[in-house]
């Protein structure tokens, strides 16, 4: 479950290549609220990715949890778990596409300005799922993912790397932010798999 979310975010990383500063454009289409306005090279592609990848990921997670439960002889009610992920994603998509003025009024710019809000949506869904499944280890990974998502959204994660002398071209620095949340989820998935086998 956690690994699937980590893979979805990892696959989104290459979509977050920024335009040079002198080519940034304020505003843009409402679909670009999902993906950093006109600051990315391909903002519409990034928005489409999230709209398609998240529901597919939730479907894969449902299949995984149902098959895992069947193998253990436990029936898992997927209605609530799927509803959380789909509702969070749908709310983000509907509000950004149908009511962008509402979205821009009530969601602070620093949370949505770079198009990284889907990272937080994925992490919050994981956190709620962990509570619903009553799994403390998944809850710990969910808390770490929410923290990583907030750091990715609010901070330039490439800055410490630059300070350490690692050169990252400016157009690829936002990719580091996306990668942080993906790495946290993938490491969390590895830790959960290790715990389950041990």
Image (tube, helix red, strand yellow):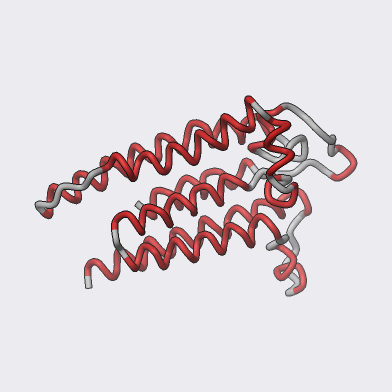
Return the residue nearer the eye: 56 or 84.
84
Q: Residue at x 48, y 64 (%)?
A: 143
Left or right of residue 167, residue 198 in this image: left
In which quadrant of the rendered image does the C terminus lie?
A: bottom left
- Residue 161: which quarter of the image? bottom right
Where does residue 127 sit, x and y in percent of width and height? 43, 57
Q: In this view, does 191 lie above or below 9?
A: below
Q: Is residue 76 above or below residue 101?
A: below
For the image, the number of numbered tags is: 0
Where does residue 75 sit, x and y in percent of width and height? 15, 47
Left or right of residue 65, residue 184 in this image: right
Q: Which residue is drawn at 34% across and 51% down?
A: 1
Left or right of residue 33, residue 8 in this image: left
Left or right of residue 191, residue 155 in this image: right
Where does residue 78 sit, x and y in percent of width and height? 27, 42
Return the residue nearer the eye: 40 or 58.
58
- Residue 44: which quarter of the image? top right
- Residue 176: which quarter of the image? bottom right
Q: Residue at x 61, y 32 (%)?
A: 95
Q: Residue at x 61, y 46 (%)?
A: 117
Where does residue 36 sit, x and y in percent of width and height? 71, 40
């Amino acid at each position: 479950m956690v690994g699937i979310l980590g893979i979805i975010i990892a696959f989104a990383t290459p979509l977050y290549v920024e335009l040079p500063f002198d080519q940034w454009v304020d505003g843009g289409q409402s679909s670009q609220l999902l993906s950093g306005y006109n600051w990315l090279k391909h903002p519409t592609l990034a928005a489409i990715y999230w709209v398609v990848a998240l529901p597919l990921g939730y479907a894969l997670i449902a299949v995984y949890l149902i098959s895992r439960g069947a193998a253990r002889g436990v029936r898992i009610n997927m209605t609530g778990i799927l509803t959380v992920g789909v509702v969070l994603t749908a709310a983000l998509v509907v509000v950004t596409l149908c009511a962008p003025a509402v979205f821009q009024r009530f969601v602070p710019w620093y949370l949505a300005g770079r198009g990284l809000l889907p990272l937080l949506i994925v992490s919050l869904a994981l956190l709620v799922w962990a509570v619903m499944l009553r799994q403390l280890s998944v809850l710990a990974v969910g808390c770490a993912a929410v923290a990583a998502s907030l750091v990715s959204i609010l901070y330039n994660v490439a800055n410490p790397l630059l300070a350490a002398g690692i050169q990252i071209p400016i157009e690829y620095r936002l990719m580091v932010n996306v990668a942080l949340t993906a790495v946290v989820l993938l490491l969390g998935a590895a830790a959960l798999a290790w715990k389950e086998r041990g």
